[in-house]
Amino acid sequence: MGDVMKSIANCKLQIAPSPSPLPQRRGRGEGEGAANCKLSICTGVGLLISLAVPAGVFPAGAKAKATGSNSDLAKLQGSWRVVAGESRGKPKPEDALKDLKWVVKGNKITLKGDEGKNFVLRFHIDATKKPKTINLTNPERKETVQGIYQLDKDRWKLCVGVPGEKRPASFVTREDLNVALFVLEKEKSSQ
């Protein structure tokens, strides 16, 4: 899991086929560098830009858009645990996901992994689109991935692509699609 978290912070974000369903673990200094880093579904995506816009500064018709997005942004605040993940049509093992936690505060998501490593990412949502959209940005790498999301009470479903590619149109992964699907549940203590 630590390698996956490092991929987000230190490498180009990409969802790439891997011989195994989980990314290969490598020690420090091993591997081919950032260009070959892989991002598995296990990562617990979360990288975006703020949609905090001062009240009264909206162009005509934009208040409804901001209100829906602000409502979802408020619902996302708190701690979430990753309960399911899938990429290239294959589900990820439960034990690979059990220690993954996302903490949303404002427009930032802190990804917490099993090795005590934390990475902070920024995000931006638009709840007026069908399906709702999310952009995730790694501020250190200045790379953004586009995705879609669904928020139903304490369940958050997210499907994201790779940098530079189109936003996914549905919550589906297949061998021929460079997308990852995450399902998160809000922790009771953060409700």
Image (tube, rainbow, N blue to C red):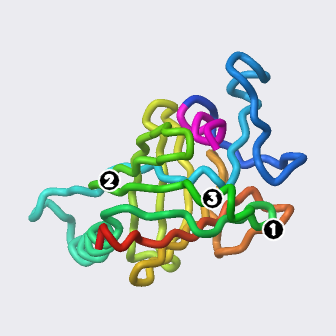
Residue 84, located in which quarter of the rendered image? bottom right
Q: Is residue 187 magenta?
A: no
What crowding class fits label 2: few (fewer than 14 Cα within 10 Å), some (14-19), or many (20 or more)? many
The residue that mark 2 highlights is: 107
Disc 3 marks a residue whose amino acid type is Leu
Q: Residue 183: image x %, image y %?
A: 57, 70
Q: Earlier in the sequence, mark 3 or mark 2?
A: 3
Question: From the viewer's perspective, is residue 172 above or below residue 46?
Answer: below
Q: CA distance from mark 2 to mark 1?
A: 29 Å
Discs 3, 1 touching: Cβ within 8 Å: no
Q: Which residue is mark 3?
A: 97
**Contact (CB < 8 A) between labels 3 and 2?**
no
- Quick check: 18 left or right of 36? right
Across and down, in percent, residue 116 comes to 49, 39
Please tell me whether the stretch drawn in magenta is mainly helix, strand or loop.
helix
Mark with earlier residue (3, 1) = 1
Type of the residue with mark 2: Asn
Using the rendered image of the protein, determine whether residue 70 is visible from the camera's viewpoint: yes
Mark 3 vs mark 2, foreground winner is 3
| Amino acid under disc 1 | Gly
Gap between marks 3 and 1, in whole Å? 17 Å
Farthest left residue in view: 56
Q: Quadrant of residue 82?
A: bottom right
Residue range highlighted in magenta: 1-9
Which callout, 3 or 1, points to the residue nearer the camera? 3
Q: Position of residue 7 (x, y in %)?
A: 62, 36
**Residue beneath disc 1:** 89
Q: Residue at x 25, y 78 (%)?
A: 64
